[in-house]
C-alpha cells in the first residue's frame, strides 16, 4: 500500500510539473535571441557560441563524409516510395504533414502570447517611402490578425513608422510565449503515433 501511495505521489508531482508553464522568449533587434525557460532551468537556443558553431560545422563535415562512404542511407520517404510506390509515399507525406500541423495548432491555440513589434522604414524619395509604408502596414496587420486568431494574446503592441528624411529599415520584435509542457508532450506523442501509423500502413 505504501509503495502504491509513493508511486501515485510521484506521478501526481510529475503531472503538476507538466502543468507549470514553459516560457519561450524571442527577441530580434538586428540579431535573433531565443531562450527557453522552465522553472529554474534556462536554455539559450539562439545565438549559439562560436565554439558550438565550430562543433556543429565539424559534425556536419563528418556526417557528409560518412554519407559519401555509405552512399547515403535511405530516408523513410524514399524507402516507402521504393517499396510501395510514389502514391503511397505522397499519402504518407500528406498524413504526417496534416498531423504535424494539427499538433502545432493545438499547442499554439492553448498558449499565451505577449509581444511587441516595431518597424521603421525610410527612403530618400518620400513618394516611395509612402508606397512601401502602405505595403508594410498591410502585410504586418494581416500577420497580426493571423497571430491573434492562433494564440491567446494577453498583450500586444504594434508600431509601424515611416522616416521621410533617412534611408533605413529597422525591425524589432520582443515576444514571450507560454506553453504547458503537458500540451506539448501530448501533441508530440499524437504526432509520433500518426507518423508510425502512416509508416506502417499497408
Image (cartoon, rainbow, N blue to C red):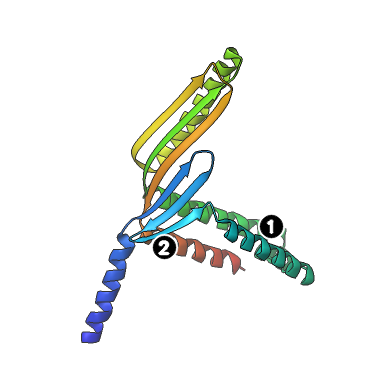
The residue carrying pointer 2 sits among few (fewer than 14), some (14 to 19) or many (20 or more) residues within 10 Å by Cα, namely few
Position of residue 51 in the picture relative to residue 146 (left or right):
right
Query: Residue 162 appears at what percent x and percent y?
Result: 50, 20
Query: Residue 7 appears at what percent x and percent y?
Result: 28, 80
Q: Is residue 1 visible?
A: no
Position of residue 55 in the picture relative to residue 4 (left or right):
right
The residue carrying pointer 1 sits among few (fewer than 14), some (14 to 19) or many (20 or more) residues within 10 Å by Cα, namely few
Position of residue 28 in the picture relative to residue 16 (left or right):
right
Residue positioned 53% across, 26% down in the render = 136
Instruction: Name the mark nearer the viewer: 1 or 2.
Output: 2
Q: Is residue 178 visible?
A: yes
Quarter containing the C terminus: bottom right
Residue positioned 57% across, 64% down in the render = 198
Say the numbered circle drawn on residue 119.
Answer: none
Q: Earlier in the sequence, mark 1 or mark 2?
A: 1
Viewer-proximal residue among 193 and 16? 16
* Residue that protrudes farthest toward the front in the picture: 50
The quadrant holding residue 15 is bottom left
Say the numbered circle drawn on residue 87.
Answer: 1
Residue positioned 52% across, 29% down in the render = 139
Kindly state the secondary structure of the residue where label 2 is placed. Answer: helix
Residues marked 1 and 2 touching at CB (< 8 Å): no
Query: Residue 49 appears at what percent x and percent y?
Result: 55, 56
Q: Which residue is mark 2?
A: 185
Query: Residue 67 appears at what percent x and percent y?
Result: 74, 68
**Structural distance between the alpha carbons of marks 1 and 2:** 31 Å
Amino acid at each position: 500500500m505504501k509503495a502504491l501511495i509513493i508511486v501515485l505521489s510521484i506521478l501526481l508531482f510529475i503531472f503538476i510539473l507538466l502543468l507549470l508553464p514553459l516560457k519561450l522568449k524571442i527577441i530580434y533587434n538586428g540579431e535573433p535571441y531565443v531562450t527557453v525557460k522552465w522553472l529554474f532551468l534556462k536554455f539559450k537556443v539562439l545565438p549559439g557560441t562560436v565554439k558550438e558553431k565550430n562543433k556543429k560545422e565539424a559534425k556536419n563535415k563528418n556526417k557528409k563524409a560518412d554519407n559519401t562512404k555509405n552512399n547515403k542511407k535511405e530516408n523513410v520517404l524514399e524507402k516507402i516510395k521504393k517499396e510501395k510506390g510514389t502514391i503511397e509515399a505522397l499519402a504518407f507525406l500528406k498524413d504526417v504533414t496534416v498531423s504535424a500541423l494539427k499538433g502545432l495548432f493545438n499547442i499554439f491555440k492553448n498558449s499565451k502570447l505577449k509581444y511587441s513589434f516595431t518597424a521603421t522604414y525610410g527612403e530618400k524619395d518620400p513618394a516611395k517611402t509612402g508606397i512601401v509604408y502602405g505595403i508594410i502596414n498591410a502585410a504586418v496587420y494581416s500577420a497580426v490578425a493571423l497571430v491573434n486568431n492562433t494564440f491567446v494574446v494577453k498583450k500586444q503592441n504594434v508600431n509601424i513608422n515611416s522616416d521621410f528624411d533617412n534611408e533605413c529599415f529597422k525591425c524589432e520584435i520582443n515576444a514571450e510565449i507560454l506553453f504547458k509542457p503537458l500540451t506539448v508532450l501530448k501533441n508530440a506523442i499524437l504526432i509520433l503515433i500518426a507518423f508510425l501509423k502512416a509508416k506502417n500502413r499497408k
